Image (cartoon, rainbow, N blue to C red):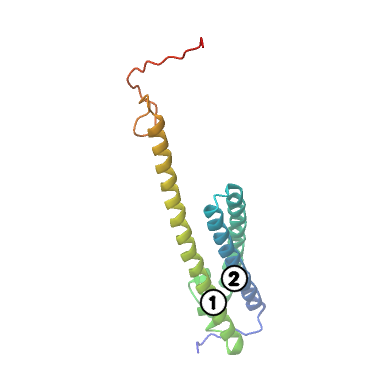
């Protein structure tokens, strides 16, 4: 057990527990957003995708506000244990300075949050990969359509208008 123990009754530990719980809730909400985004892409639902991105932005904003609270409370607790890392002190490190059941509960919460954040990262990377593949597919389709419709050869390889050969065409308007 570390030398500098934190009294399990200090209010900063209540704040830390609350922040950990709310961060976990926000991470669960982020997982739901990622799943909804993936479903909207699969269904080609542009409005649904917009709603997902709006909600995801809100959740990320909430995570940012929670992280500000986390930095403040961790900074105070870090000074109680003599950590020079300040707000960068880990939850687990702080929990190791809290005796008894409360310290064990904080370690469990910290571990669960870390695992949840890793799930979010992994699922987000998968969704990003799917979005990149979809974008590449759509670019390929657009390029193929442009090539098919470019009988006059006025578009270059980059899809921009280029001077091409003269095309003689006419319309019979007398008929």
Q: Is residue 140 left or right of residue 41?
A: left
Q: Nearer the viewer, residue 118 or 175?
A: 175
The single residue placed furthest to the left in the displayed view is: 165
Q: Which residue is mark 1?
A: 112
Task: Kindly indicate the quadrant of the structure image that contains residue 141.
Answer: top left
Classify mark 1: residues with Cα within 10 Å, few (<14), some (14-19) or many (20+). some
Q: Nearer the viewer, residue 148 or 115?
A: 148
Residue 132, compared with residue 143, is above or below; it is: below
Classify mark 2: residues with Cα within 10 Å, few (<14), some (14-19) or many (20+). many
What residue sits 45% from the left and 56% below the top? 130
Residue 88, compared with residue 160, is above or below; it is: below
Q: Nearer the viewer, residue 28 or 158?
A: 158
The single residue placed furthest to the front in the displayed view is: 175
Kindly state the secondary structure of the residue where label 2 is placed.
helix
Where does the image place residue 98, in percent across and percent down from the top left? 57, 85
Where does the image place residue 135, in percent across and percent down from the top left? 44, 47
Residue 73, compared with residue 53, is above or below; it is: below
Where does the image place residue 158, in percent across and percent down from the top left? 36, 34
Task: Kindly indicate the quadrant of the structure image that contains residue 95.
Answer: bottom right
Task: Kindly indicate the quadrant of the structure image that contains residue 125.
Answer: bottom left
What residue sits 62% from the left and 73% below the top? 21
Kindly state the secondary structure of the residue where label 1 is placed.
helix
- Rounded to the nearest whole Å, what is the CA distance between mark 2 and mark 1? 8 Å
Q: Which mark is residue 24?
A: 2
What residue sits 56% from the left and 54% below the top? 40
Question: Which tag, 2 or 1, sits closer to the chain's start?
Answer: 2
Where does the image place residue 66, in percent across and percent down from the top left? 61, 65
Q: Are marks 2 and 1 in contact (CB under 8 Å)?
A: yes
């Amino acid at each position: 057990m570390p030398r500098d123990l934190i009294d399990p009754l200090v209010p900063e530990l209540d704040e830390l527990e609350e922040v950990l719980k709310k961060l976990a809730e926000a991470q669960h909400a982020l997982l739901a957003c990622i799943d909804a985004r993936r479903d909207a892409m699969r269904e080609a639902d542009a409005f649904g995708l917009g709603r997902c991105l709006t909600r995801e932005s809100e959740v990320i904003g909430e995570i940012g506000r929670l992280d500000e609270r986390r930095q403040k409370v961790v900074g105070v607790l870090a000074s109680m244990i003599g950590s020079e890392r300040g707000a960068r002190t880990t939850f687990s490190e702080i929990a190791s300075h809290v005796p008894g059941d409360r310290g064990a509960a904080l370690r469990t919460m910290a571990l669960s949050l870390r695992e949840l954040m890793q799930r979010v990262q992994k699922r987000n990377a998968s969704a990003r990969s799917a979005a990149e593949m979809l974008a590449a597919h759509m670019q390929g389709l657009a390029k193929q359509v442009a090539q098919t419709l470019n009988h006059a050869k006025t578009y270059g390889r980059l899809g921009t208008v280029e001077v091409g050969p003269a095309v003689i065409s006419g319309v019979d308007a007398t008929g």
